[in-house]
Image (spheres, helix red, strand yellow):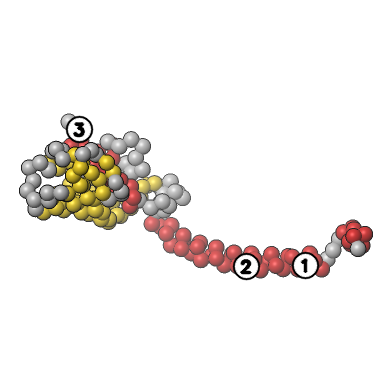
Amino acid sequence: MNRLNAYNIDIFKLSNATHNYDFEVSPSFFEAFEDSLVTDGQVEVIVVLRKSDTMIETNIRMKGSVKLTCDRSAEVYDHVLETGNNIIFKYGDDWEELSDEIITVPRGVQRINLAQYIYEFIGLAVPMKRLHPRFEQDEVEDAETNEMVYSSFDEKEEEDNSSTTEEVDPRWAKLKEIKK
């Protein structure tokens, strides 16, 4: 049995109303996706689905933690995530992604699998720069220090330029005389 079948929602037998679903994301979920950024984690997923005659609106809320590898120390740490996203499934002729939030589904489709969408939303919640929490304060201090370094660097450069204009190499002085 495919481990992602647990994320199927049978929409053909749903009434036009609001329905709630709870899913658990565990390490086996991430194993189903090749070359995954996240390989381990525990995330609770709550889906509120509103079905009507023309569309299905889903509100997907996630809360939990995933294991990430720190870019600085290569140490594994738990990254807490809490995110919410919406997807609208509109009835149409074929499967087609109209935008990041709107997808057309064939009118006769009987079920929608949310696993890929959940996986993508978790991936979007992962920061681009993955830092262990013990480095976050250092990162803030480094950012403040870099601003000071840049300003002092500019001042030092101006000082260097002024000192080089005062002390001219005698060989260059002779060349400047020829130029006049």
Q: Please identify the quadrant where the C terminus is shown.
A: bottom right
- N-terminal of the pair, mark 2 or mark 3, is 3
The amino acid type, in three-letter code, at marker 3 is: Asn
Q: Which residue is mark 3?
A: 2
Marks 1/2: CA distance?
A: 16 Å
Bin the neighbour count of mark 3 within 10 Å (Cα to Cα): few under 14, some 14-19, many 20 and up: few
Q: Which residue is mark 1?
A: 163
Residue 22, position as x, y percentages in the image:
15, 49
Question: Does the rendering let one see residue 101?
Answer: yes
Residue drawn at x 30%, y 49% is 100
Residue 106 found in image quarter: top left
Mark 2 and mark 3 residues within 8 Å of each other at the beta carbon: no
Residue 37, position as x, y percentages in the image:
36, 43
Left or right of 138 in this view: 172: right
Marks 2/3: CA distance?
A: 60 Å
The amino acid type, in three-letter code, at marker 2 is: Ser
Left or right of 141 in this view: 17: left
Residue drawn at x 64%, y 64% is 153
Q: Is residue 167 above or below residue 126?
A: below
Disc on res. 152: 2
